[in-house]
Image (cartoon, rainbow, N blue to C red):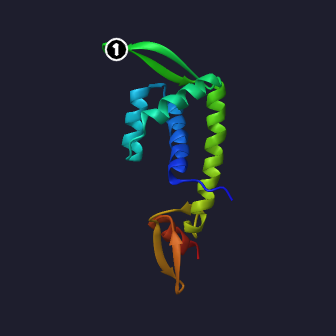
Amino acid sequence: MVKMSIDELLSDFSRFYILTILYENPSHGYEILNKFRKRVGKKVSPSLVYPFLKQLEQKGLLKHNVKKVGEKAKKIFELTEEGKELSTRLFKRFSNLVSIAIEPSLQVCANCGCKVYEGGYREVVDGKETAFCCIHCAHSYKREK
């Protein structure tokens, strides 16, 4: 059995998240570091980011242009079409994994059938607690009974 350390796991998550940042907009390195910190609540090491950007570029998944940002010239990194396609495939895979992980926590609205992760509305109907996405669905459900 292969053991993966928390650091290895987090670095893989960090790389995945760097891809999401680049997928949204072309960004320079410092911008990637800041967006990561603000969204994830943790700093990501430049020693992880810059080598990863270099790897992506060597594989033809990323390109850069040098643009003047304020007083400095900065490399603005942008995913190539191949990089965007790879990201889309990874996002779909990740979405499936997240769905599997949260499926047991979902409630299904008794009226419209939508899935509710948090919140929702619960009401006792015919002596049984019933889950709804909102009070409006609860009212509709009771009218139809």
Near-viewer residue (127 or 75): 75
Where 99 sits versus 69, above or below? Answer: below
In the displayed structure, does residue 139 sit left or right of residue 71?
right
Q: Which residue is mark 1?
A: 72
- Asked where in the image residue 56 lies, by quadrant, the reply is top right
Q: Quadrant of the image for the N terminus?
A: bottom right
* Rendering coords of residue 16 (x, y %): 55, 41
In the displayed structure, does residue 72 sit left or right of residue 11?
left
Near-viewer residue (5 or 130): 5
Residue 109 is at least partly visible in this image: no
- Asked where in the image residue 43 lies, by quadrant, the reply is top left
Residue at 66% across, 34% down? 86
Residue 127 is at least partly visible in this image: yes
In the displayed structure, does residue 62 sit left or right of residue 118?
right
Where 30 sits versus 133, above or below? Answer: above
Secondary structure of the residue carrying numbered label 1: strand
Near-viewer residue (106 or 98): 98
